[in-house]
Image (tube, grey):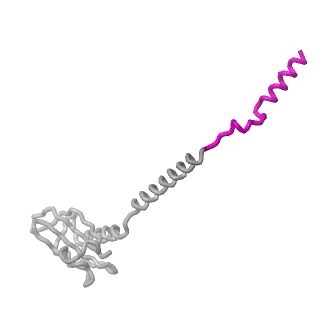
Amino acid sequence: MSRDSTESGASATRNGPSAAFPTADRAAVEPIAALVAVVVVGLALGLYAGAFADAAPDDRRSAAKSALDRVEGRVTVGGVLDPDRMRRVEAPGTAIAIELEADGERWLAASGPDAPGPPGVRTPEAVAVAERRVTVRVAPGRNVRGTLRAVVWR
């Protein structure tokens, strides 16, 4: 009995996990498949980097939005924009033009001599524009919807 158990233990040790694998049993990758995998991973990283770059906020656009927020706060009283208050538009350090369109009328204001000109004069590539719908007082007791637009140089 002792002899049988010794033989079975020895054979288990020889064929167990510590036994060496012959070279034919090892995994291998074809060079073409490896090259294709590297190219696919490279393309995926390139697409990811491109999408990440496109998702970054545009600083010029955010400058126009922040200018619009500042101006709206100065010309709005009780949630209603008064066109007469547009003369008070000042944005130190920023050349900004403010446009207001409501009820078929247009009001323009500029923060200084370097501010962008009217839409027919300025080039679209040279400016950043932000706009928002607002309530505009056109007469005492008469309010209409309009568009407030901030234009800054890029």
Q: Quadrant of the C terminus?
A: bottom left
Q: Nearer the viewer, residue 77 or 125?
A: 125
The quarter of the displayed image where residue 103 is located: bottom left
In the rendering, at what x and y percent does residue 98 appear?
22, 73
In the rendering, at what x and y percent does residue 139 appear?
9, 68
The quarter of the displayed image where residue 119 is located: bottom left
View extreme (right): residue: 2
Q: Is 18 positioned to the left or the right of 91 in the image?
A: right
Magenta residue check for 4 = yes
Q: Is 50 positioned to the left or the right of 84 in the image?
A: right
Q: Residue at x 16, y 66 (%)?
A: 136
In the rendering, at what x and y percent does residue 15 appear?
78, 29
The quarter of the displayed image where residue 85 is located: bottom left
Q: Which residues are magenta?
A: 1-29
View extreme (bottom): residue: 113
Q: Residue at x 13, y 62 (%)?
A: 144
Q: How many marks?
A: 0
Q: Quadrant of the N terminus?
A: top right
Q: Nearer the viewer, residue 67 or 17?
A: 17
